[in-house]
Image (cartoon, rainbow, N blue to C red):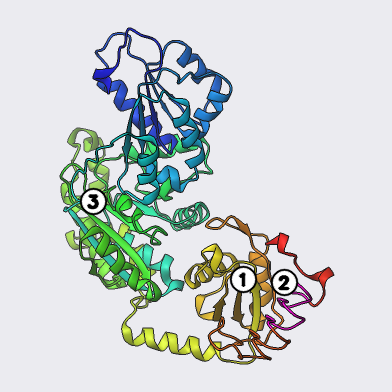
Amino acid sequence: MIHHIDFSDRTTQALVICPTRELCLQITKDLQSYSKYIPQANVVAIYGGASIDNQARDIRRGAQIVVATPGRLMDMIDRRKVDISSVQFVVLDEADEMLNMGFKEDIDIILKSVPSDRSTWLFSATMPREVASIAKNYMKNPQEITVGKQNSSNENIEHQYFMIREKDRYFALKRIIDFYPEVFGIIFCRTKRETQEVSDKLIKDGYNCEAIHGDLSQGQRDSVMKKFRERTLQLLCATDVAARGIDVSNITHVINYNLPDDIENYTHRSGRTARAGKSGFSLVLVNTKERNRVRDIERVIKKDFVQRMIPNGKEICEKQLFALIERMTKVEVNEKGIAPYLDRINESLASLSKEDIIKRFVSAEFNRFIDYYKHSEDLNVTMKNDRNDRGERRERGDRNDMQSLFFNVGDMDGVNKGMLVRLICDNAGIAGNQIGRIDIRREFTFCDVDPSIAKQIMDGLNGLVVEETGRKLRVNPADRPSGGGDGGRDRNKGGGGKSYGGGGGRKSYGGGEKKSYGGDKKSFGGPNRKKSFSKRDY
């Protein structure tokens, strides 16, 4: 692109659009490097979180190439601070992620605003239907160039997964980190909230970790990334979107705290390690219900996962001990610097034998691992204890003394049982084994819990905005017996003709009049219209 631009002309001739601020700055820096020896070349980045006036001033000086995030670009076009009427090249980088982030409308407007005879380039690690539709609508006779195998993973990456119970997810993460003393990696979480929570927990437990996600200011993001690039930060908790702009060398491990909602995003995550010919590890934590998703990823990336056991306390202590010894043997001794203190050191250690000195120096660093892991349990899930766990869940779910709770989200919102369990555990502070039967319907969900924790769950979740759906949660006691109904397989479970979950007449859901949902006509979850939630609330 640089070789096709007339840098003696000060008009904007090339436009690069990308999803995140970090990626915008990274591309700008690379383009500035590539055009370093071209006279009058000017590459300008425009992105949210920085001064729009400063960015407009840089463009007025004559920016032949503009690198932009969609939101800020639209803002500056509306304010007439950017003129894209002479653009000859339009580049959409990470096109799939921009569509996932809801930028399709902005991209459509931008592509309609540039000359029809421009050249359009799309870059995407995956090729979903939405990206193909942009190519069809805005490109003439496009050529597709594939580098490597589509959706394939780097050959130098070893993919491993660990089977866990949901309640042990964070503790398993800590063990994996402790088992790799020299880890320099990224921990991927599904949501901004989860990213911050995991990071906060790790910091509290003494790990060198920080989070990066969309809720941070530009200054905060720049500070975190600076520390990570300089390796003064060992672990980075990130969302999929925020990580798109991370281009850091020598990352040893990518840890998937949760699998991505879109399986193809796994390719993006794992690709952060094993760059420039290096090798790396992509580790995945999965609960018993997510085992099949590992197989789905294997089919996409065309590589097999290796199942690993979560290390026990003895294995971690041994690994940490010898890592400490290796660091001691490789440490560079500053003979001149320590010389003035050697006499006092020798005097202080005179009463100790060589063996005593070794034990004390090792113990000074090592005792915390011995103390922490001396009563550690086995966190691994085998088929045997998995069956026992599920058997206990079924027994618990079939009890008649459980309280049934009503949630205002359902299958149409993309809710699944694993997601609901995580929401309850993370926000109500209870363990997954305290949750009974979960019955997901199209527009709402019933969940059976012990009556003693029902209020705790309602207090923890009511009003919470679910990031995956954008919906504000409402959780109320359900007007149905616990364990009633199965979502419609047996049209006579729990009540009258075609009722779901008990009580009521024809086509009722949880009792009430004709076409009611736990209340009077067209109401949801209440005995009368005044106290019920209308359809508008949904």
User: Which residue is denoted by mark 2 in the rendering?
Assistant: 524
Left or right, residue 40 beside residue 342 = right
Q: Amino acid at mark 3?
A: Gln
Contact between labelled residues 3 and 2, with CB atoms less than 8 Å apart: no
Q: Please check the rendered image and state whether residue 280 is part of the magenta-colored stretch, yes or no.
A: no
Residue 94 visible, this angle: no
Occupied quadrant, residue 298? bottom left
Helix, strand or loop under label 1? loop
User: Which residue is denoted by mark 3 in the rendering?
Assistant: 150
Q: Quick one: label 2 or label 1, which is nearer the N terminus?
A: 1
User: Label 2 to label 3, Cα distance in Å?
Assistant: 46 Å
Q: Amino acid at mark 1?
A: Phe
User: Which residue is denoted by mark 1 in the rendering?
Assistant: 444
Residue 61 visible, this angle: yes
Q: Which quadrant is home to the N terminus?
A: top left
Percent from the top left, x then y, of residue 8? 32, 7
Q: Quick one: label 1 or label 3, which is nearer the N terminus?
A: 3
Residues in magenta, as a range: 507-526
Percent from the top left, x then y, of residue 484? 61, 87
Contact between labelled residues 1 and 2, with CB atoms less than 8 Å apart: yes
Q: Is residue 226 above or below residue 461?
A: above
Percent from the top left, x then y, of residue 153? 22, 53
Left or right, residue 124 beside residue 59 = left
User: Label 2 to label 1, Cα distance in Å?
Assistant: 9 Å
Q: Which quadrant is home to the C terminus?
A: bottom right
